[in-house]
Image (spheres, rainbow, N blue to C red):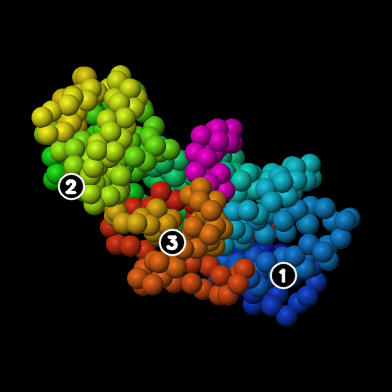
Amino acid sequence: MDSLITAAARALAAGDPLGALNRVALRDDPPALALRGIALAQLGDLALARTLLRRAARAFGSKEAMARARCVVAEAEVALAARELGWPAHALEAAQATLEAHGDRANAAHARYLGIRRLLLLGRVDEAGHALAALDPMHSPLPLQAIHALLQAGIAIRRVQARAAQAALGRAGGAARRAGIPALMAEVEQAALALAAPAARQIVQGVAQPLRLHEVETLLGSGALVVDACRHAVLADDATVPLATRPVLFALARMLGEAWPHDVPRDVLIRHAFRTKYADETHRARLRVEIGRLRTLLREVTGLRATKHGFVLLPRHAAEVVVLARPVEEAHAAVLALLADGESWSSSALALVLGSSQRSMQRALDALAADGKVQPLGQGRARRWTMPPMPGFATALLLPAPLPGD
């Protein structure tokens, strides 16, 4: 490897993409193409970065397997930054195996972290946690130690473990400062700000109050009966009753939770749960059926009693009932929560994460764009959607990482 390539690789490892470009910008040999691609990705030109990385991988040829594998890992990083979550994971796994076989443990570990970041973005938190627990960062380069800790923080946030997240961010900040990479230090600071922002709203007897993540953690351990409108479940002590696939039942549970200790009139329950302006005998009959179903599902944590005018919750053991809602609630709040990380997302990636069809997602994005809350970038298959970070809106997507150096 010649001196310019070596110097460019060191500049990238130190977080200096402009310094790397100054050394290889006019060269078209495979190592220079790869380094130019990584540098441009760090600067935000993801489309050109991908083109250069693919050219470099083809130019290296079959005899330079390790160099080709490094290009694949870098391209996977670019795809993740562009929120192209459908990128073939098997290609990254094959590249990781090649790097391990050739003794390049640092880049192999980086490939593993990319796979874990993808799992976390897709909401597969337990899989991400198991994969991360299998990695030991102690002897890794400082940037990878910071990435490891940031992933630990992201997983802890998804699991509503504020103390663990704070400790992990402290480790990430220490590793980033020792590495001396400004972009990585900025990512840790941004993650810390997100952790300090309101993560939910507590609604008790109709009165709402914002909660930060550590307050949410305290609430969930308080013994209260929690109607969780963030994850659509009812929680009490160690019992969890999921209602994500039963929207009518959850709507009833939430209305009863917000009104507790008072009852909710039948007509109100019908209008809100069934989305109708008028209530007749068929609606009242359906309400009796749905209340019966809800009573059966919640029998371990709370009772439901019929009153003269409607229904009321009767917790089995909890002293109070609390509704836990998103910090911002509107028709497409989940889409805004993903876009609040400041990255540009494709509609297909948003649909994949939220479990929606792409057509439904496109309608949601069009509605948000009409209200000026999101904006499209690009055309056709290259179109991405973005928005400025929303002040006071906590995001659970803490997935920063620098592109790998040589």
Amino acid found under the numbered disc labelled 2: Gln
Q: Nearer the viewer, residue 76 or 251?
A: 251
| Residue 388: quadrant of the picture | bottom left
Q: Is residue 232 left or right of residue 96?
A: left
Q: Nearer the viewer, residue 237 or 155?
A: 237
Quick one: quadrant of the C terminus? Answer: bottom right
Q: Nearer the viewer, mark 3 or mark 2?
A: 3
> How far, Cα to Cα, is label 1 from label 2?
50 Å
Q: Nearer the viewer, residue 30 or 202?
A: 202
Amino acid found under the numbered disc labelled 3: Ala
Give the residue at mark 1. 52
Q: Considering only order in the chain, which callout, 2 or 1, is on the residue closer to the N terminus?
A: 1
Main secondary structure found in the magenta portion:
helix
**Residue 133 in picture, x, y percent from top left:** 54, 33
**Residue 310 in picture, x, y percent from top left:** 16, 33
CB under 8 Å between discs 3 and 1 = no
Circle 1 packing at 10 Å, graded few (<14), some (14-19), many (20+), is: many
Q: Nearer the viewer, mark 3 or mark 1?
A: 3
Residue 40's tag is none
Circle 2 packing at 10 Å, graded few (<14), some (14-19), many (20+), is: some
Give the residue at mark 2. 209
> How far, Cα to Cα, is label 3 from label 2?
28 Å
Give the residue at mark 3. 364
Q: Which residues are magenta?
A: 117-135
Asked which secondary structure carries label 1, the reply is: helix
Image: 314 above or below 29: above
